[in-house]
Image (cartoon, rainbow, N blue to C red):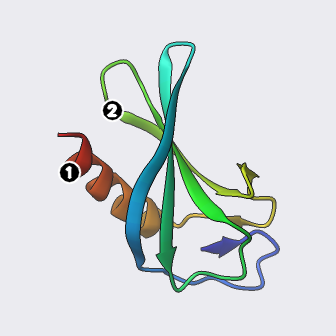
């Protein structure tokens, strides 16, 4: 997780990923994914995975309590973990 105040940076291993919701948003599909791991003090953390019409992931956003996280974002490695898992689940 990248602390947007630049005080902390850590690479988290994400486990127990699960899609808990999905919904269309114009031409995209949004998937809400819960996860566990050695994460900072986030309240109800989840990932919002936005997928285009082709099925490719366009964006992965860290959320807290159902909203974009104001203080943290995923690292590229954490996004890669989610991408790998998501592609296995959706195929």
Q: Could you tell me residue 81's position as x and y percent?
A: 35, 64
Judge from the rendering whether residue 66 lies leftward or rightward of residue 20; answer left or right. right
Give the answer, above or below, for where 33 lies relative to 41.
above
Q: Give the residue displayed 38% in from the left and 70% down from the top.
A: 16
**Circle 2 residue:** 56
Residue occupying image coordinates x 60% and y 74%: 1
Secondary element at image label 2: loop
- Nearer to us of marks 2 and 1 is 1
Horizontal side of residue 88 vs 54, given as left or right: left
Circle nearer the N terminus (2, 1): 2
Q: CA distance from mark 2 to mark 1?
A: 13 Å
- Count the numbered circles shown: 2
Do the residues bearing badges 2 and 1 touch, measured as CB atoms within 8 Å?
no
Residue 74 point in image, percent of width and height: 56, 64
Decide if residue 42 is on the left or right side of residue 20. right
Q: Residues within 10 Å of mark 1 (few under 14, many from 20)?
A: few
Residue denoted by label 1: 88
The percent position of residue 45, horizontal first and vertical second, equals 63, 65
Image quarter where the C terminus lies is: top left
Name the residue furthest front: 20
- SS label for mark 1: helix
At horizontal 39% and vertical 74% (from top left) the residue drawn is: 15
What residue sits 76% from the left and 68% below the top? Answer: 4
Q: Is residue 23 left or right of residue 13?
A: right
Give the quarter of the image for residue 43. Answer: bottom right
> Which residue of the protein is positioned furthest toward the left in this rendering?
91
């Amino acid at each position: 997780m990248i602390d947007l105040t630049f005080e902390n940076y850590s690479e988290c291993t994400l486990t127990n990923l699960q899609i808990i919701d999905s919904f269309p948003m114009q031409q995209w599909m949004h998937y809400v994914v819960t996860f566990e791991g050695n994460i900072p003090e986030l309240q109800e953390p989840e990932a919002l995975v936005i997928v285009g019409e082709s099925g490719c992931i366009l964006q992965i956003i860290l959320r807290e309590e159902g909203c974009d996280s104001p203080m943290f974002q995923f690292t590229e490695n954490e996004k890669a973990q989610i991408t790998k898992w998501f592609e296995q689940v959706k195929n």
